Image (cartoon, grey):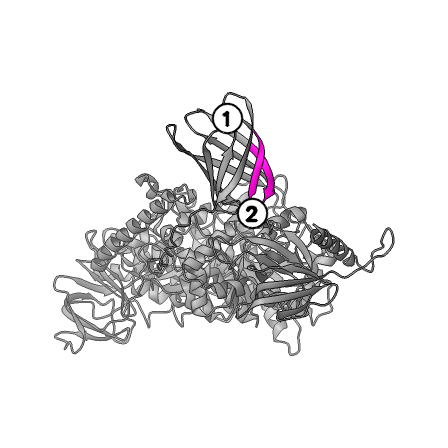
Amino acid sequence: MKKTLLLCFALFMAHLLYAQDTFPVNGTWDIRPGQYAFTNATIVVNADQTIANGTLLIKDRKIEAVGAGIAIPKGYVNIDLKGKHIYPGLIDAYTTYGIPDEPRKEFSRRGSYTPVYTTTKPGAYGWNEAIKPEMNAKAIFHADASKAEDLKKNGFGAVQSLIHDGIARGTSVTVTLGDERDNEVMLNDEAAAHYSFNKGTAATDYPSSLMGSIALIRQTYYDAQWYKTQNEEYNISLAEFNHTQNIPQVFEVSDALGVMRADKIAKEFGKQYIFKTDGDEYRRLDAMKNTGSSFIIPVNFPEAYDVEDPMDARKVSYAQLKDWELAPTNPAAMEKAGIKFAITTYGLQNGRDFWPNLRTAIDNGLSEKQALSSLTIIPAQMLGVADKLGSLEKGKLASFIITSDDLFKKDDIIYENWIEGRQYVVTRMNVTDLRGNYTLASDALPGVTLKIGGTPGEYDVNLSRAGADSVKAKGTITRSGDIVSIYFDLKNKPEGSVRLNGYITNLSPLTFSGNGIMPDGSAIKWSATYSSAITAEPAHPEEKKEIEVGPVIYPFVAYGSAKLPVAETILFKNATVWTSEKEGILQNADVLIENGKIKAVGKNLAAGNAKVIDATGKHLSPGIVDEHSHIAVSGSVNEGTQAVTAEVRIGDVLNPEDISIYRQLAGGVTTSHILHGSANPIGGQTMLIKHRWGVLADQMKFEGADGFIKFALGENVKQTNWGIPEGTPNMRFPQTRMGVEQVYMDEFTRAKEYKAARSVKGSNVRRDLELDAIVEILDKKRFITCHSYLQSEINMLMKVGDTMGFKVNTFTHVLEGYKIADKMKARGIAGSTFSDWWAYKMEVSEAIPYNGALMHDMGIVTAFNSDDDEMARRLNQEAGKAVTYGHMSEEEALKLVTINPAIMLHVDNKVGSIKIGKDADLVLWSTDPLSIYAVAEKTYVDGIPYWDIDKDAANQKAMKDDEARIIQKMIAAKNKGAVTQKPKGRRPHKNDEAAEDDEYVSDGAGQTSATQTVNQ
């Protein structure tokens, strides 16, 4: 008792020590140092050093000494920790601890919708509210003892805390979880600058898409560079953005694709981000390692799905099944790959899940050494506090935890969490162990014995009685300090629940005494005296089996493969070859491909070492080229919040995991032109891709292809069909077709002035990514593909081009192209149209299915496009319709989806026809490719068989087998008590003409919102 009082007094005096010098004290000053010696402990200094039977000395807030055989100075309180462990206090590198919700709500949109183009925030801030580097967590942080509770119980002594809102989020703080004033827990007032792709609560409409977020970040970096050298304006946001560039830069992303997108920004501006992720790095480990970045990863692994009902199981995708199995392997996979990472509790719904989930990661291969490093020294280094935290060394803060055993053992107990020399009790350390056999003494319960087992903190109790009235029963026991409560039902003599309540009255032998209530309500007195230890069964340590999991597949969706296909040397023999060249259609011909190129075309070619495919009775064609597509895009396909968004780039948001890529390979498509939507007169920059299923996003891009940009005319751009109530104030310009023309005139005028100003030697003109793209058009380095319908509007844009010095490369859709084909021909403009779409909205009321043939006959380079992820799977059939509508020859009809779109896209020197030296992008058809019965049996991109109908059948069977295996594993997990979640139905997504028209829809309150891509 004396020692306990001494410890309590010392702790109280230590608290007084922390009173800041700048704060007055109401009373006399009595500042005494807190001095403690923790002896006979196993001290884990860091992940690489452990001291047996060691001593830890702390004085005031800091570690005075750590080691073995240290003499205890006079005046230190000696705390004997024999049999116990000391670890460095844990650090959570990503939290919102102490950050109030109100600052995040302050800028949220309220009331009915009115478009917001620039900031509504008073002050000399930047134009976009999503860019708020001026937000400093240190200004609003306030320690919150109740929210710190779970973190402390889990062993955390310090955290990084940030304002989780916006794209540029300002700076975070590193704080301890102590109970002192805010001033005293602050370790680093500018721990890091934070970023994300999520605009958060910003009132400004822009950006409404992922590609818009990326463009905004890039433009902000360029603006900040310009701001340092200008004297034209004062901008708090840009000043603060520059101010925070020399501290750690943390970028939050939702997946591995987001890491690669953000890393491209980092490389462009010479930055090195620390990535906070959602924990799916295992899907693209090589790419993650190639970033050279450190990571902050969660352990909020997905719960098993309740899939006992086969109908529910159908709602769970293959990717979800795989992720449930593989997500717990992510930390181990990153460790094996040599990637530096910290572990965070962020994302856990309940703090109690942290240790079970972390131990699950260890069961899945994460080493305890790495786990400790990722919770101590690594986050300390990331946050610039490694001189204070992360290990137990002289001079560092006295932040540590005391445990019963190895920290990562299942039965380990965290007893105390010391934060800057202050004690926080998690579980009482020197509490008597209740386990053992007891003799129960009570007149009402003769001959009954108690057996208390289990573990401290999770006791269980069993009761028995020998003799003629023998009985065995299991009861319930709870403990609160020295008080115990026991409940049981003997089923016989007496029958019903007996409730006992008592407390420890003696320690040797251990004895309880108290009162009880019998089933009939009568009161009794009882006592229980320790008689013997529980006979321990011989220990049979379970052999730790390696958890078996399936392989990672590429891409991480259905029909992905553990191993990607490679280029083959192949000789196709005796095929009907549709060359789309002057040679026309060759009968019984051979084609040899090697090293991804077409090496020879002819008859009776020698096979050499090539694999021979007997193509007798089959047809070989060039791969189909789709000039207008919206597949493989993450986030919205439109950035329609401004009339001109030339700064956004489809190439920034390619999604290589879109199942449409694989499905279209099954339809013979090998190249697709991915366009921005048609929400504004000048949209974003497009991207030409090859259908390389399973590769990274950048690896899909068509090498060396010219850049294009999307323009649009018609109802979409003037927002007629956006569902916005009439009279809504401040609507986006333009609202009329006249306004659309003025947008083009104004933009190209500005671009010319911008180019001229930038060309002046020594000029300090701000770089504008939007105008850069328009200048590229003027310089014939970027080319226009324009969404169009009406003759009058098409004519208008051609005349604007004549006036301003640019030319439209392709009018797409162009359903009234037959009316102005002569004007298009005179200007060398191509037309990419639909085969037979008409009358689906007012502005296409005069469309005709002969449009394609009429433009072709006029000498215009004409193509058929899909603008639809489903239609693209049968563009060969769409081409065949030209034979019916317009009586085109079959040879010319196939060119509508092969060489002609390749010419439009300036890649006819590489794809679109079967010619020696071109890319080996080929399709082997079961019959005439224009037939509705034609099946693509094999599709090659660069000589790689990305689609093979026979291999697909085998792949589907293997996938079903794997699904069944994981489902059985989930059911077994549920039966063992695992928490499960109810499967939810999946909604398909379409990026097509309808999506372009319906991208902005009313939410019922007059507010328009952008439809987001849902990835399968």
Using the numbered discs, state the Cα–Cα distance from disc 1 to disc 2 in whole angstroms.
90 Å
Q: Quadrant of residue 928?
A: bottom left
* Neighbours of disc 2 within 10 Å: few (<14), some (14-19), many (20+): some
Q: Is residue 608 magenta?
A: no
Majority secondary structure in the magenta region: strand
Is the C-beta separation of discs 1 and 2 under 8 Å? no
* Foreground pick, 406 / 704: 406
Q: Say which amino acid is labelled 1.
A: Ala
Q: Look at the image and tell me whether residue 136 can be seen.
A: no
Q: Residue furthest right?
A: 28
* Position in image of residue 136 (x %, y %): 69, 58
When the figure is inspected, residue 930 is found, relative to residue 466, above or below; the finding is below
Q: Which mark is residue 878?
A: none
Q: Which mark is residue 444?
A: 1
Which residue is identified by label 2? 735
Q: Please give the range of residues in magenta.
A: 501-515
